[in-house]
Image (cartoon, rainbow, N blue to C red):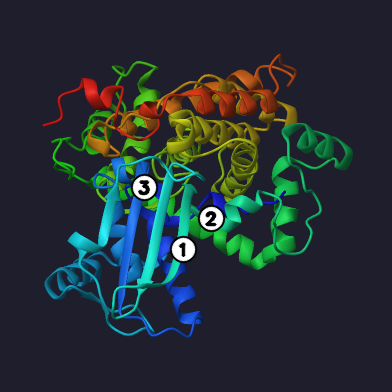
Amino acid sequence: MFLSVFEMFKVGIGPSSSHTMGPMLAAARFLERMRAEPFHYAGLRGSLHGSLAHTGVGHASDRATILGLAGFVPETYDHDRAEATLEAIRASHTITPPDLPTLKFSPRNDLIFDFGPNLPGHPNGLILMATDSQGDVLLQETYYSIGGGFVMTEAELAAGKATEEGPPVPYPFKTAAEMLDMAERSGRTIAAMKRANEIARHGADGLDAGLTRIWQAMNACIERGLAGEGTLPGGLGVRRRARGIRDALEAERGTNLAAPHRINDWISAYAMAVNEENAAGGQVVTAPTNGAAGVVPAVIRYWRDHVPGAQEGRVAEFLLTAAAIGGLVKFNASISGAEAGCQAEVGSASAMAAAGLCAVMGGTPRQIENAAEIALEHHLGMTCDPVRGLVQVPCIERNALGAIKAVSAASLALHGDGSHFVPLDACIETMRQTGQDMSARYKETALGGLAVNVPNC
């Protein structure tokens, strides 16, 4: 099994990797299919299903789909150009994809929110259609946005997880037990094995440049969030708080007034800064999702700025270790809130961050696996119940607490020798089963939990 570090950490846009980035990427894939077929197209239609329908407005799923059909992709997204494009589409009821003719498309009538039963493959379903001048369908595809910006067609999802493209990798572990066994036999760290796997696919130069860009994008997002002010969009009236927390902490520097637990406030400020940017539709890095994007960057920033002996050159080791753990969770369970609740998003992110921190603080592979297990175990059962379908309440604070848990989990693991009662594999399987048993009301539909018990209008 190989999931690249660049699949776990993708530069994209907020507020959601599965509900915003996913539909945009699905639309881009549909345009590729259209270009490959010899049909004379005249129009486009689509429908959003399941969680994409229930929370699609709050997550800008409709907007993302339309922009994707107009040729936008998350990595090169330009906000001002997107706004101008949307305005033109609404006014003209037409859309002009790159390298395709101008097509009929009414945002109000041709993109439907279908609140009926979920499509069979996944709670995040999307159907796109290209039509002729009579409105008859010439080309149709069903896509599933399975979390973290990963998109699969109906056929790809039915084929299962076995399909994998690219040359073989030297350390193809599918479970934490295999990972630890390979580490013991090879004498390599988890990061070293992951690096060898990545080099087999991307080459050393591409890997190093990519990891540098990922951390730069994460850190830039923290800085933008720490500088941001005002109220987040969406109608809940949620104020940005990261800057105020940071300013208060800065004012306490050099005094004897600060309590030791203030370090948790720094960690929280870093995480909340990222997720406030995400909620505002800014550029973030999936880690492994947008809804959980603040945890890993916050823990890296905590380590870099507050832990004696930290070296920026080891951030790559942190990211590679975190990606190895995230890949195990995605392959064996889920990183999708719509599929398994917030345990799959913030829980997975916390496990990844705990593993990365443990690694750069000198942890052995067994201590790293223990750190990941502790962090994930103490997110089991967490529901995904965003108020008004917005990635704001409780999502922003959950990232702060997920980061704090990650630091605590790494510290606990480093105080042991790596031996522990619950294996990471068992914890991941428990998370999968818990998500399977969880009511759909608590899986990113905004039909239960805080979403219905907190006044939001």
Horizontal and vertical percent position of residue 190:
72, 41
State whether residue 75 is above or below residue 239. Answer: below
State whether residue 82 is above or below residue 10. Answer: below
Residue 267 appears in the figure: no
Q: Within 10 Å of the Cα at label 1, are there few (<14), some (14-19), or many (20+) other Cα atoms?
A: some
Residue occupying the point 71% across, 49% down: 194
| Mark 3 lies on residue | 49
Residue occupying the point 75% across, 47% down: 193
Q: Are marks 2 and 1 in contact (CB under 8 Å)?
A: yes
Horizontal and vertical percent position of residue 160:
65, 49
Is 50 in front, or is 56?
Answer: 50
| Mark 2 lies on residue | 154
Q: Earlier in the sequence, mark 3 or mark 1?
A: 3
What is the quadrant of residue 127 in the picture? Answer: bottom left
Horizontal and vertical percent position of residue 366:
74, 28
- Label 3 – label 1 distance at C-alpha: 13 Å
Residue occupying the point 85% across, 40% down: 187
Where disc 1 sits, the SS reads strand
- Label 2 – label 1 distance at C-alpha: 8 Å
Left or right for 356, reference 81: right
Q: How many marks?
A: 3
Q: Within 10 Å of the Cα at label 2, are there few (<14), some (14-19), or many (20+) other Cα atoms?
A: some
| Mark 1 lies on residue | 141
Left or right for 433, reference 60: right
Amino acid type of the residue that numbered disc 2 sits on in the rendered structure: Glu
Horizontal and vertical percent position of residue 24:
38, 61
